[in-house]
Amino acid sequence: QVQLVESGGGLVQAGGSLRLSCAASGSIFSFNSMAWYRQAPGKQRDMVASVTSGGTTHYADSVKGRFTISRDNAKNTVYLQMNSLKPEDTYVYYCNIEEETPGGMAYWGKGTLVTVSS
């Protein structure tokens, strides 16, 4: 089992910044991708940004140039630096870790709420 604990969410004004953190513990896979997703009530969960074990990153078009994902393998932690926040970035943000093998295991955190006021 892998446990993921997110932190760093909160209320921020439009144009502001927040940094989310997600610490993984337990039986962590040797090669894994870590990612941030976000979800509004009643909507599907969408990928925001991901980073592979090799450091390759991917971003949703809506956050490119504003959000930066990074990871500290020594701490088993992934970060999401969010700048120039917009009200439409208001979501619950979830951390994800996935084994980099076909059909590999995946785990989710419980989520952290980010609210951007206009």
Image (cartoon, rainbow, N blue to C red):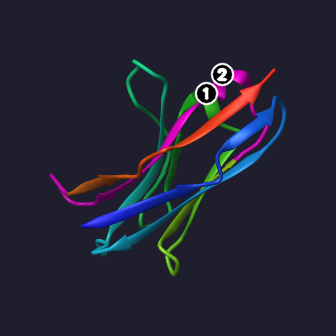
Residue, x 47% and y 73% (percent of image)? 76
User: Where does residue 66 sit, x and y in percent of width and height?
Assistant: 72, 39
Q: Position of residue 91 (x, y in %)?
A: 56, 30
What is the three-letter code of the residue carrying label 2?
Glu
Residue 102, by quadrant, is bottom left
Say which of 110 and 36 sits in front: 110
Q: Quadrant of the C terminus?
A: top right
Does label 2 or label 1 sit earlier along the sequence? 1
Q: Which residue is mark 2?
A: 88
Q: Name above or below for residue 108 compared with residue 72.
A: above
Q: Secondary structure at mark 1?
A: helix
Residue hosting label 1? 62
- Compared across the picture, whether 52 is left or right of 107 comes to right
Tell me which residue sits at (41%, 66%) in the image: 53
Q: Is residue 76 magenta?
A: no
Please report contact status of discs 2 and 1: CB closer than 8 Å, yes or no: yes
Q: Is residue 100 above or below residue 66?
A: below
- Numbered-mark total: 2
Of tags 2 and 1, the one toward the viewer is: 2
From mark 2 to mark 1, how far is it between C-alphas? Answer: 10 Å
Residue shown at the point (63%, 28%) measured from the top left = 90
Q: Residue at x 15, y 52 (%)?
A: 103
Residue 66 in view here = no
- Residue 95 in magenta stretch: yes
Secondary structure beneath label 2: helix
117 left or right, relative to 97: right
Which region is colored magenta?
A: 82-104
Percent position of residue 35, x then y: 45, 50
27 or 70, which is in the foreground? 27
Residue 104 image point, x, y percent: 19, 57
Q: Residue furthest bottom?
A: 74
